[in-house]
Amino acid sequence: MDINSKIEAFSSLQKPQVAALKKLGLFTARDLLFYFPYRYLDFSKISTIKDLQAGGNVSLRGKIKTIGSRFSFHGRMSLAEAVISDDTGSIKVVWFNQPYLAKSLKKGDDLFLAGMPEYYNQGLQLANPIYEKASDFPVHTSRLVPVYHLTAGLYPKTLRNLIATVMHLCAQVTEILPAGIIHNQNLLTLPETIQFSHFPEDEGQIKKAQTRLAFEEIFINQLAAQKHRLELEQKQSFKIKFGQKLIGSFVKTLPFQLTPGQKKAAWEILQDLEKPLPMNRLLEADVGSGKTVVALMAALQAAAEGYQVSLLSPTEILAKQHFETAKKYFISQKIHFGLLTNAYSELDNGAETKEKLQKLITGGMPGIFIGTHALLAQKVKFKKLALIIIDEQHRFGVEQRAQLFTKAKKVPHLLSLTATPIPRTLQLAYYGELAISQIKSRPAGRKTIFTRLVNPQDRQKAYEFINRQIGDGRQIFVITPLIEESETLETKAAKTEFENLKKLFPKRTVGLLHGKLKSAEKEWVMSQFLGRKIDILVATSVVEVGVDVPNASVMMIEGAERFGLAQLHQFRGRVGRAEHQSYCLLFTQKEDPAILERLTAFSKTFDGFALAELDLKQRGFGQLIGGKQSGWNFKFFNPSYVALIAPAKEEALKLLKADLNLTNYPLLALQIKDKIVHFE
Ligand code: ADP
Ligand code: MG
């Protein structure tokens, strides 16, 4: 038996158990070692029988005085009954429906038992305790007992026994972290970590093991990020001259004054573009802060200098919207701008065939080319691409970002835009290699979106209000509850609400948008809404991103407690994008005071960053960034380990300075191979 042994090799396992283990992704002894418990039961204190009390988990050690089995409840249930005693007394123990126990255990056996004593027929008894033969190395009792995620057909004891059997193979695990780092950071080695995770002697060992795992994870994250940054620094990009005159005159043509935040961000970006180093910058600002115009200023500058720019959106509608904005803004500029998606193909102010547009791009015609990631498809080969702008960057999958890779000696500058506020404390963890510009100020004159948690009794009033708003020419969003892990259930909830609202508002047009629609169908529904063909749009969380429907004035959110505050804030940002006073109405069926408090806090807070911090404190990571899309799913690292980021970064940099290609650390190189951070 070694660390690579297949689970089929364990003679103790039956076929269904092997299948269950595989379902959990456990194929080898190594997999078992790395299958960490998600919590522990504290059975570490052994009580004497005399001191037992009802309630609370206890462990005890005793010998079987008597054991036998019988049927009870009119013969429908088998009972194994035993009396166990230690030096101080004895206690009755029963096991339901485990008749084989009476055969496998016998009088005189020395046992560890763990469970919760209770009163029964005037005496204390222990029902269905976990038991095992007493030994120096208990696995299921008399210790901190690991609890694992299981699946049908696999008992806790089976898995625990199995992991205990392979524990001695820990020594064969290859360490990933360099010895120097383990030493400097006072970390456990990997074998120790595994040992302490599964079978800790005390809480301290659990904590140390978890710290080591969190450190390793954030270290690898930093290593990937910093390696990428250092490599980028060795590359060349295009020096795009900052024409203050051009930018100044462009700003004068805008129908509004730039906010101080917009000016600062634009300045930072335009400064970066002048340098020969590839820019790698994130523009982070709350919804409605006006990121688009800032991005377009950079695009204008590059196009005016004779380069190509591509602006990529997550959806066709957004691309189209950006194109319309470009038309408005660039009408008097001497630059080209095009729209190229599956559905659209336009150049400057007129329709253009896709083929022609592609040819012009391939031929190197300077300009700004707006599209979805379809623009990255093989056919479109930019000849002078100097700047890539990615809108709503968190919606871009990792693979899509990888497609941006260019083998050319000169790499384009990259600017990505996001409305996901990431608490400052975590920015380094997520975007360690990026330069960040933030716009904190919002355009003047924006009305605050009236936000209320609506009392269930007032639902009817809310509907009447909505009806009046529609009567005034406005449009309504209704968001149905998030059902994690099940798009099917989520869609069902949306469909039900859709039917419900159609009945409630027979004279209004109700639309439906959910994740099961094909993307062209989604786009179509959104365009109907945008074109005011729909009064009320019922949608699942898919509606979250970017689209500007200036005429929508009410955002109604059902099951509001299911969303993170940052996400609620994104929804709220879908309304109030024009002059109309707008409203965000939250509904919950929960009466939990903590939930009500959280939602009430949301109704009074309008700063996305403050909400993100609050989310982080209350609900941890997961809610901040759209799970899978973030590109980083931390398994062990969480906000309580923020203090590990700085040392992890420092160690990563030290290592990379000596060995950028990680030639001496093949295992680490392998670990970061697939981690594309932001842009490559
Ligand atoms: P986001 O940051 O969410 O992408 P947008 O760029 O879509 O925001 O801008 C939201 C709206 O605000 C747009 O209609 C835009 O024209 C407008 N806007 C942008 N900057 C300003 C400003 N400085 N003053 C007034 N309105 C602005
Ligand atoms: Mg936007």
Image (cartoon, helix red, strand yellow):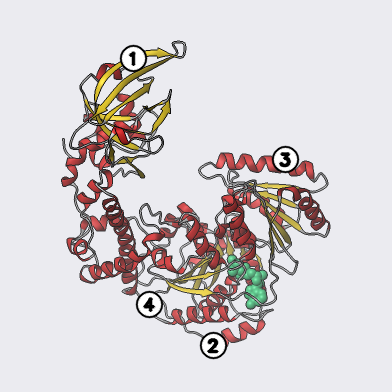
Point 52% across, 76% down: residue:
298
Residue 164's place in the image compared with 346, above or below, is above
Q: Is residue 269 left or right of residue 595?
A: left
**What percent of the width, then of the height, locates residue 471?**
83, 56
Residue 564 located left or right of residue 75: right
Pointer 1 or 3: first along the chain = 1
Q: Residues within 10 Å of mark 2 (few under 14, many from 20)?
A: few
Of callouts 1 and 4, the N-terminal one: 1
> Which of labels 2 and 3 is toward the front?
3
Report the Cα–Cα distance between label 4 and label 2: 20 Å
Residue 347 seen from this side: no
The mark that comes first in sequence, 2 or 1, is: 1
CA gap, disc 2 to disc 1? 92 Å
Location of residue 167 (image quadrant): top left
Task: Identify the amino acid type marked 4.
Answer: Leu
Q: Are marks 2 and 3 in contact (CB under 8 Å)?
A: no
Residue hosting label 2: 244
Rounded to the nearest whole Å, what is the CA distance between mark 1 and mark 4?
Answer: 79 Å
Q: Nearer the viewer, residue 550 or 421?
A: 421
Kindly report which numbered mark, 1 or 3, lies closer to the viewer in this rendering: 1
Q: Earlier in the sequence, mark 4 or mark 3?
A: 4
Q: Which residue is mark 4?
A: 277
Query: Label for residue 499?
Result: 3
Residue 126 placement: quadrant: top left
At x 55% / y 42%, what residue is drawn?
487
Discs 4/3, front: 3
- Residue 463: give x, y in percent of width and height: 77, 50
